[in-house]
Image: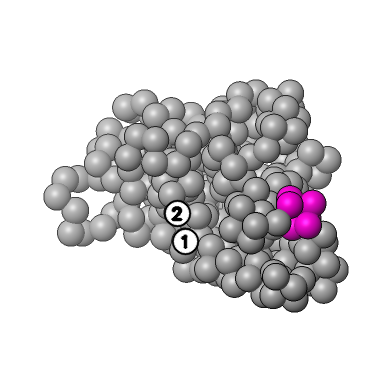
């Protein structure tokens, strides 16, 4: 197979799944992992994808933010597994905050049948899930901040920050645009980064939900250091080097396997 054919195949696979792994591509294309890495280098140089540890993801510029509907279709098995592990950290009677994101929305689905829990959120999808009128049982008490809507369906800005600052919660569960060894937790949206800081400030504990493609991604706005993270939940697509780095930098690293308890 010619290099141009391989690269077209890589881009097709990336378009369908949102992320690709070097090992999977090497097996599918019957070439070495080194060949795949060279192809990814070439495609990254052409700004057709973004290389990450162990593979590549669809390319978003640091100032760009994918819409929530787009993110919800990518790596859903991983997100469900991460959300399941996060839900296990929520005890009856807790008051928690949930930030915006497709993975945190999966967490909200699991908490929909937990009426003893109280949830504060700045996410329209999270609030919609928690307050769905057609559910068979009552859900958690849910409070939605006001604010300006972002492409990820988060409510941000001064109104959101003021509303959220009036609460104190046992734990905040955040999704992230990027997790990086040096930059920490980042977002491409400056207002969303500030609102995430508020969500962290009102909480006794920070739990971050991030699939493996978020590692090595850096948005324009930093909102937390890695050592501020009490617990980080990721899927097993995260490579060994990244696991070692995160295991040393965050309070507790949990690695889940998609579909393991489905």
Left of 85 or right of it: where is 139?
A: left
- Residue 56 in the image, given as x and y percentages of width and height: 69, 57
Which color scheme did the rendering employ for the protein? one colour
In the depicted structure, whether residue 259 falls above or below residue 39: above
Q: Which residue is mark 2?
A: 76
Identify which residue is drawn at 27% across, 37% down: 114
Left of 237 or right of it: where is 33?
A: right
Residues rendered magenta in the picture: 32-37
Residue 190 can be seen in this image: no
Q: Secondary structure at mark 1?
A: helix
Location of the N terminus (image quadrant): bottom right
Q: Secondary structure at mark 2?
A: helix
Location of residue 226 by image quarter: top right
In the depicted structure, whether residue 84 falls above or below residue 151: above
Q: Was residue 92 drawn as part of the magenta stretch in this picture? A: no
In the image, 27 versus 119, the foreground residue is 27
Identify which residue is drawn at 29% across, 54% down: 131
- Residue 12 in the image, given as x and y percentages of width and height: 59, 72
Q: Nearer the viewer, mark 1 or mark 2?
A: 2
Separation of residues labelled 1 and 2 (CA atoms): 7 Å
Q: Which residue is mark 1?
A: 72
Identify which residue is drawn at 82% across, 73% down: 46
User: Are the residues flagged by discs 1 and 2 in contact, CB closer than 8 Å?
Assistant: yes
Identify which residue is drawn at 34% across, 59% down: 128
Most common SS among magenta residues: helix
- Residue 216 in the image, given as x and y percentages of width and height: 75, 48
Location of residue 120 by image quarter: top left
* The disc label shown at residue 208, or none: none
Packing grade of label 1 (10 A; few <14, some 14-19, many >=20) is some
Location of the C terminus (image quadrant): top left
């Amino acid at each position: 197979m010619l290099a141009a054919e391989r690269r077209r195949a890589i881009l097709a696979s990336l378009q369908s799944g949102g992320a690709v792994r070097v090992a999977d591509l090497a097996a599918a294309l019957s070439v070495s992992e080194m060949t795949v890495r060279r192809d990814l280098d070439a495609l990254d140089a052409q700004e057709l994808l973004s290389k990450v540890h162990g593979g590549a993801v669809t390319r978003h510029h640091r100032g760009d933010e994918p819409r929530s509907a787009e993110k919800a279709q990518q790596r859903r098995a991983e997100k469900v597994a991460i959300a399941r592990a996060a839900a296990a950290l929520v005890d009856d009677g807790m008051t928690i905050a949930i930030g915006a994101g497709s993975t945190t929305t999966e967490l909200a689905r699991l908490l929909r049948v937990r009426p003893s829990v109280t949830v504060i959120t700045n996410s329209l999808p999270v609030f919609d899930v928690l307050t769905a009128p057609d559910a068979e049982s009552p859900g958690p008490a849910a409070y939605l901040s006001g604010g300006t809507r972002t492409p990820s369906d988060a409510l941000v800005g001064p109104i959101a920050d003021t509303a959220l600052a009036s609460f104190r919660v046992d734990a905040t569960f955040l999704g992230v645009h990027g997790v990086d060894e040096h930059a920490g937790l980042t977002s491409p949206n400056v207002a969303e980064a500030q609102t995430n800081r508020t969500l962290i400030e009102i909480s006794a504990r920070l739990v971050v939900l991030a699939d493996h493609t978020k590692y090595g991604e850096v948005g324009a706005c930093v909102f937390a250091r890695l050592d501020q993270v009490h617990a980080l939940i990721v899927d097993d697509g995260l490579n060994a080097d990244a696991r070692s780095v995160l295991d040393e930098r965050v309070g507790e690293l949990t690695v889940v396997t998609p579909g393991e308890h489905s």
